[in-house]
Image (tube, rainbow, N blue to C red):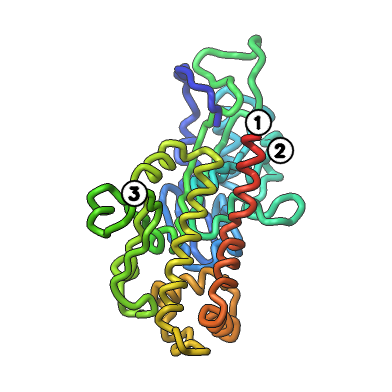
Amino acid sequence: MSSEKRTVRPFRTDARLDGLFAGAILSFGREQCLSGASVSIREDFERCTVALHLAPQDCFADFVQRLREGVIGTGLRLADTCLVVAARSGYLKSSEVVYCHSLDDPSALARVPRLDESGTGERREVFRAATHGVTVDCYLALARTLPSDQRVPLVPWRIGTWLSHARFRVRCWEDAELFRPQPLDQEKRTELGLPEGTVTFAEFDGDVADAEADSADVCTFWVDEELLQTIDAQARSGTAEVLQRWLFAEFVAAVLHRYGVAALGTSAPQERMDDIRDSLFGRIVLLLAGRGADDEQLDALLNTCVNSPAEVIAVAQDRLRLRRAAVASLKGEA
C-alpha cells in the first residue's frame, strides 16, 4: 500500500493470515473472479455491479474469527488494522480506495461490500473505462504508523503495510480483442505509400459488417511507431491518457467511415443488428449503444450510422469521455 521506495524490514505474520482471502470472490455483473485469477466481461462494463464476497455465508463467522486471531497473533491490536480494497485502471491512469473498514470491531465487517458506488451513489470513476478493465486488490493492512514506543522487532509498524493480500483482474471484452494498434514504422509507411507526417492509418481487408470474419483480419490500425513508444514511456501522464482515448476514437471513426462507404446510395442499412452483431462494425455499435440497449435502439443507431455517421462519431467521443480527459490534462499542465 505504501508507495515509499525503501528496503522493508523483515517481519512475521500469524499463520492464520496466510491465504486469508483464498475463498474471496469478486462479482462483476454476472461474472465471478476468484482470488489470483482474471475474467473477461462481455456485459456493459460501465453498468456492471461490482461487489467483493469475502467468504461464503456459512464460512463468514470463521473468516472473521481467523482474521481476529491472526491480527492478535501477529502482535498487533485490531484497532491498528483495517481491511482495504483498492481498484486501479491502467487505461484511465487512476487508482481509488473503494472500500475501507477499521477492524476495531470485526463483527461489523460487511460480508459482501459493494465497490462500484461512491458515498453519493454515483459510479466510481475507476470503474468507468468503457473499453478497458480494472485490477482490484484486497488488503488486510496497518491503518496507522505505530509510535516508536509501541514498535516490537519483527512486527510490522508502518501504515499501509499489508498482512494479507488478494488480487482480482477484470478484463473488458473490447479491451481483449477489439482495439490493437500496430506500430507504423518507416518500412510500413513506405509500403503503404503514406507521407512522413501520417499519424494513423486504417488498413481494411474485408467487410467490416461480416460476422464471420476475424476483426483483427478485417482492419489493421496503424499508429506512428514513435508516438506509440512515447505513449508507453509516459503512460501515467494526462497527455498519454488523452492520446489513447483519441486513438480509439479515430479507430471507431475509420470503421464507421468504411461502413458508410459500403452503404453509399442507400438510405437505410442493408442488414439488421442481429445479422452483424459479431462483426467488427457490429461490436462497435454494441459498445456505443451500451449493454442496456434493446433491438429497436440498436437498429436505430445502425440507421444513424448510414444517414449521419458524424453524429455517431460524436457519440463515440462521449462514450470515451474524450472531452473530460482533454480538459483535465490541460488544466493539470497549466
**Comes first in the chain, label 2 or label 3:** 2
Residue named by callout 3:
196
The mark found on residue 78 in the picture is 1
Where residue 255 sits, quadrant-wise, is bottom left
- For the residue marked with disc 3, what is the amino acid? Glu
Q: Nearer the viewer, residue 121 or 175?
A: 175
Residue depth check, mark 2 versus mark 3: number of the one nearer the observer: 3
Quarter of the image with the N terminus is top right
**Image location of residue 33, percent across then percent down:** 47, 56
**SS state under label 3:** loop
- For the residue marked with disc 1, what is the amino acid? Leu
Residue with the most extreme right position: 120
Q: Nearer the viewer, residue 83 or 119?
A: 119
Q: Is residue 106 visible?
A: yes
Where residue 191 sits, quadrant-wise, is bottom left
Residue at 47 percent of width and 19 percent of height: 8
**Image location of residue 102, percent across then percent down:** 69, 36
Residue depth check, mark 1 versus mark 3: number of the one nearer the observer: 3
**Image location of residue 117, percent across then percent down:** 68, 54
The mark found on residue 105 in the picture is 2
Cβ atoms at labels 1 and 2 below 8 Å apart: yes
* Residue 97 located left or right of residue 31: right
Quarter of the image with the C terminus is top right
Marker count (numbered): 3
Disc 1 to disc 2, how far (Cα)?
A: 8 Å
Residue with the most extreme front position: 195
Residue at 60 percent of width and 14 percent of height: 151
**Comes first in the chain, label 1 or label 2:** 1
